[in-house]
Every structure is written in structure tokens, then in C-alpha cells.
Image (cartoon, rainbow, N blue to C red):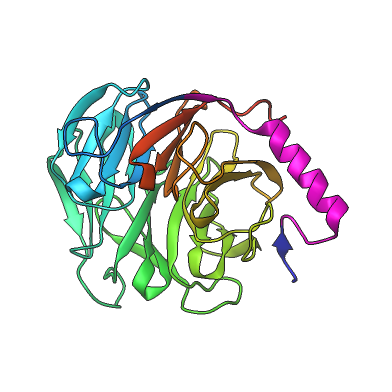
Amino acid sequence: MKGVWGLLAAGAATAAAACAIAAAASPAFVLTWGSFGSAEGRFRRPHTLAAGLDGTIYVVDTGNDRIQLFDALGKHRATLPILGAGLAVGPAGRFVLANPGLDQVRVLDRSGAELRSWGSSGTAPGQFRTPYDVALDGRGVVYVTDLGNHRVQYFRESGEFLGEWGRFGTAAGQFQYPQGIAVDVEGNVYVADSGNSRIQKFTREGAFVAEWGSFGASPGQFNMPNFIAVDRRGRLYVADQRNNRIQVFTGDGALVAVWGSPGAGPGEFGEPNDVAVDPSGHIYVADTNNHRIQKFAPLRGEDGR
């Protein structure tokens, strides 16, 4: 397909080489915390997470209708009684949260106090049908996956509408239920186009750049790619939910690492929903059906090897 990057089905030798690269680059397991329950530090299907610049880990604990904050070792710091889906953390712990239940985007301070919000139900610019994830770029622009409208919208942090792109479909720049979104340091925008089992890459204004991925279980393929993250080196981390693994790519779609399998042991997952990377490069995974967070060491080297 014209414009498609990433791993192509070019025979057993290519697949074996990709697996060898991925296995060599897989990060070491560090620790895990959490178990099923409603007490502090426990979870009921942790949905999403984000790493603050100070190393604080924010976890949307969906089944308990709250957000929990932890330090990098998993020590509980605070509980905020706030509903939401995807979130992005800005300076001083301020964070932006997608609230699909109210079709709104909210900006909150670290204590959970609302600073501003915008959005309502509908299809017009600035309206939403299930805002699912948010990302912040270096200019303070907020990007939102508008899942039910099959589009991306972007705003100033004040809520001022700036633009949108996408509609329902399978062509480049179209979406079927876009879920995760992330922005790299150069302003490139990545979208987990979940219904199309692919990642799409755009400029900050929404011009299509490239796509990669297809439905399947081979390295570089996806089965419900959900939330995503970008590290400071521009590597893209994808929670490949129903394949029970994390996959990592360069910004041009080349496979860097893949790890995980079904289970409840270290490095195993129960449909992981989200992945985050802290400023030191440590990787955190919302291991949703295991009701826990797993932490992994940074990938090795610029290319993960």
C-alpha cells in the first residue's frame, strides 16, 4: 500500500529477523504494584496512566471512579475522585482529562480542582461523541481523539477551537474509532486508529504523513491498538491490547521492541490498555485485567539495541 511503513509480510525470514530484534530489545521487568480492590493502591481495571515531569504516575482507576497518584516506586500519594478516560500531564502537575461521559475535556490542577472545561455532545467543531484520549504538545495545544465522530480535534488550552481532521473510513487520514493519541517533541501527531488496526502519523495541523500496521498477531501487526506514548527520543509505544503485548516503533514505523504474552506473571499481561514513559525512560503499563501497574527499565540505546 502506498505510504505504508513498518513490518511487511515478506516471508518467514523477515518475520524471524523482526522477532530476534524485538527479543533483544525487550526491556527488563522492574516491579509491579496493585491488586483488585477499592483500597488505596488497589485497582478495578486501571484504564489509562501518564507520567508527570516530576516522576509522578497518574492512573485512571476506572472501576473505582477515581484517579490515583503514585511515585515511581508505586507508593500511593493521593486519590482524586474524578471520572475520565485518557489524560495528559503538563507543567506543575496540571493535567488534561477526556471525560467521555459528559463529552467534555477538562483541565485540572494537581489537587483535582477544575481550571476550565469545554465541549458538549454533538458533531459540530468543538463538540464530541465520546472524547477518548488527549495529548499536549510543547506549545500547550490539546489534541483530542473524538472516537464517536471518527476524528481528531485540537484546541488551545483555553478551549479555543483550532481545527480538526478525519472522518469514518479506511483511507489514509480516515479513522474507525480512533483511541490513543500522542505528540512527539517535533510536533508530529500519532493516532491509534483502533478499528483499522493501524497507527497513523500526521503533522501538527493534521496533514497525513504515514501509516503502518494491519490486523494480526505477528510483530508489527495489531489487535485493538489502544493507548500510545512517545518518549524523548521519538519512539512510539503501543498498547496492543488483545495481543497482550507492548510494541515499540521508531517515528517512521520501524519495529524496535515487542514484549508480553497472556498471563499474570512479571512481563505478562491481561489486555494492557495503556503505556507511559517517564522522563528517565522507565516504562509503565496499565495491566488492566490483572488490576495492576507494571514498570520496566528503559530501552537500551537510540535504536533499542
Per the image, is 22 magenta?
yes
Who's the residue at 60% across and 34% down the image?
Answer: 233
- Residue situated in front as seen by the camera: 147 or 140: 147
The quarter of the rendered structure image containing the C terminus is top right
The quarter of the rendered structure image containing the N terminus is bottom right
- Residue situated in front as seen by the camera: 248 or 267: 267
Tell me which corner region of the image, top left, top right, bottom left or bottom right, holds residue 234.
top right
Image x and y of residue 209, in percent: 63, 61
What is the span of residues highlighted in magenta in the rendered image?
A: 6-30
Q: Is residue 93 above or below residue 135?
A: above
Who's the residue at 37% across and 22% down the image?
Answer: 72
Tell me which corner region of the image, top left, top right, bottom left or bottom right, holds residue 132.
bottom left
Q: In the picture provided, is 31 more to the left or to the right than 112? A: right
- Residue situated in front as seen by the camera: 120 or 220: 220
Image x and y of residue 52, in percent: 35, 31
Who's the residue at 25% across and 36% down the image?
Answer: 94
Q: Is residue 23 above or below residue 100?
A: above
Tell me which corner region of the image, top left, top right, bottom left or bottom right, holds residue 246.
top right
Q: In the picture provided, is 260 more to the left or to the right than 212? A: left
- Residue situated in front as seen by the camera: 209 or 192: 192
Image x and y of residue 263, in percent: 49, 42
Who's the residue at 71% across and 48% down the image?
Answer: 254
